[in-house]
Amino acid sequence: MNIKPQLIFILAIVFLGGCQPEQTETKDPTVADITGKVESLIDQMTLDEKIAQMTQDVPANKRLGIPFMKFGEALHGLWFNGVTVYPQAIANGSTWDPELIKKMASQTALEARALNITHCYSPNLDVISGDPRYGRVEESFGEDPYLVARMGVAFIQGMQGMGEEQFDENHIMATAKHFVGYPENRRGINAGFSDMSERRLREVYLPPFEAAVKEAQIGSIMPGHQDFNGVPCHMNSWLLNDILRKELGFDGFIVSDNNDVGRLETMHFIPETRTKAAILGLKAGVDMDLVLDKSLALSSYRSSILKDTLEQNPDLIKYIDRSVSRILTAKYKLGLFASSGNEFKTDTVVSRTEHQDFAQEMAEKAIVLLKNEDDLLPLDMARLKSLAVIGPNAHQLKPKSGTYSLLGGYSGLPPYYVSVLDGLTKKVDGKVKINYAQGCDLQGESRAGFSQAIAAAKKSDAVILVVGGSRRTCGEGEDRDDLDLTGVQNELVEAIHKTGKPIIVVLINGRPLSINYIAENIPSVLETWYLGMRSGDAVANVIFGDVNPGGKLTVSFPRSVGQVPVTYLERPDFVGHGKGRYKYSDKSPLFPFGYGLSYTTFEYGNPVLAKSVIQAGGATTVSVDVTNTGMRPGDEVVQMYIRDDYASVGRYLKMLKGFKRISLKPGETQKVEFELNSENLAVLTQDMNKVVEPGTFTVSVGASSRTEDLKTVTLTVVK
């Protein structure tokens, strides 16, 4: 790994008046250089100073010149005021475009450096297990491990940089979370315990972290809050040492999730004292104790907890030295020792115009067209005299404190926010009369606003009905036991539908919802998730056709909460009289993984293999011609799924192993090619080895995970 210029410590230290060691600058230090500097510093540190380094947000050590390392959250922009807020992670996943994610993360890193933030707790590499009751669905890129891996690698590479740019003055250190299997719980509850086979761990939850370590060289990792197969992640040496460090080769530092070393005592009830909890965390390899409110009652890595025990048992100090070494190494890599003034800046607007414009571009590419009967969309402004904009999510005023609830969790406060009402009003520029009515509150039971909303609809040529959820109904700690629209929103939809006006429903939400009435009765439906600070501009451009929506779902939509978990990652279940179906309802999702429509149409040719027979360990390609058969330019996401037809172990019916977003003009054809190799053809055998087994493989290429949207070809693998 190339490390940027750092400082060499001169070993002669004057221990008078708290003097700092003399520092000089050198060029291109090697890993060995940093190792030597770190070892020298550790030799000079007192036990109290070592323990202090293991608490997040620790002040600078002036005696030894050890710098301050400020952390932040950066899921979709920084969690601070004055920053650019991009679309939420679930919306970013819907772009199916890793390069967009990479650029967003690189812009976020620039804003972070402007605030002297050098270490962030993002990205979220959790694979959503098909249970949208879980409030943190919105923080994930989706339900598929390959997709999450590709988006996660792009995020990390954009934020940290690669090669000579890694951790330079324009990049910061990322933290992949939550290691591992965090969403796999039985009740859709945040931090619920995870019980799973090693097969499911390795097939579904581990791949994004493996890619983060091996491809993106992630600098930091955060374990999950939960109990994993009976052992909490923060004391799980098998996960953190055997799997993460020894098997995957992770060499960065591990930071706890908030209060989680202490929670070994207070939530998991395993150690009887905080000291024992701290020792368990240290031995498992948790290097830094994150306590967001800096509460002494919740902290574990502090001298009053550890020092007496360490002095009585000096053999434990090796764990302290190991963790401090990893933390100091990160500070060297980030160039903090070379920084003369790295105090945290506050109340600074760091959002740039070009970042805000890019946030809008991302938002436009994230929007998913779920339904469009009779080509109601896009609207023709020249044929409209009036337009009703209705719904609790249509508009939001600037909050007095906090941030806009329609940005999703882990959002900063941007310089401004463009609501759907704002965006449409600006778009029509007085050419179309806008009739606005809120109709109802997002969660309230009052129908008092229905009459005003109905009146607005009746005097308009078309209706934009904006419903869904917000940070009040979804996000961390906002788990639910039903997936319907909250409050009386569904009744509002029914009331407006009865006016007979053309209706476009715009969903702003953080989780898949059971929107059966909307899916059955409303002609056009847009899933927008949380689109960031330029939400309204993006929605307006899609509604009026300046942008052709090309996003695709990365999570399946259930028909009801009773269908949960719902995901395309299914194993064969057509047994007995049930034939894999519910007795009284459709088993298929309301909208499947990979699904999304366009204002144009696309035709797929038959997939073609460069070689239809290969040897195990060999490689070939599959290609398909995709043609825009409509009248508008548009984007299509071409998806490739693979299944080993007959293998020594059970498999999912299909798994995503390739995708590419392409742009086509009317009548244009593009050949899209994917590689088939020992990585994406392998199965995990009974002893957990990755092996390509001889036999036939079904390779499916198409527009979504639905069988009817895919065309297949058979590949044969021989010994």
Image: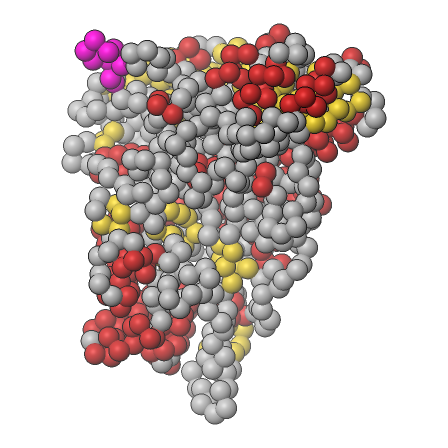
Q: Is residue 111 visible?
A: yes
Q: Where is residue 278 in the image (x, y as percent from the top left)?
A: 28, 65
231 is higher (above) or lower (below) than 448? below
Tell me what residue is drawn at x 26 percent, y 62 percent. Answer: 277
In-image side of 12 versus 576 (left or right): right
567 is higher (above) or lower (below) than 340? above
Whether 399 is among the magenta residues is no
Q: Where is residue 3 in the image (x, y as percent from the top left)?
A: 47, 60
Q: Give the range drawn in magenta.
A: 572-581
Q: Which of 202 and 676 is in front in this view?
A: 202
**Numbered label tally:** 0
165 is higher (above) or lower (below) than 638? below
Tell me what residue is drawn at x 57 percent, y 68 percent. Answer: 342
Q: Position of residue 567 (x, y in %)?
A: 37, 25
In-image side of 175 versus 671 (left or right): left
Q: Nearer the viewer, residue 501 or 184?
A: 501
Whether 580 is among the magenta residues is yes
Quarter assignment of residue 316 = bottom left
Tell me what residue is drawn at x 27 percent, y 47 percent. Answer: 227
Quarter of the image where the C terminus is located: top left
Q: Where is residue 17 in the image (x, y as percent from the top left)?
A: 50, 91
Q: Which of 134 and 2 is in front in this view?
A: 134
Quarter assignment of residue 303 = bottom left
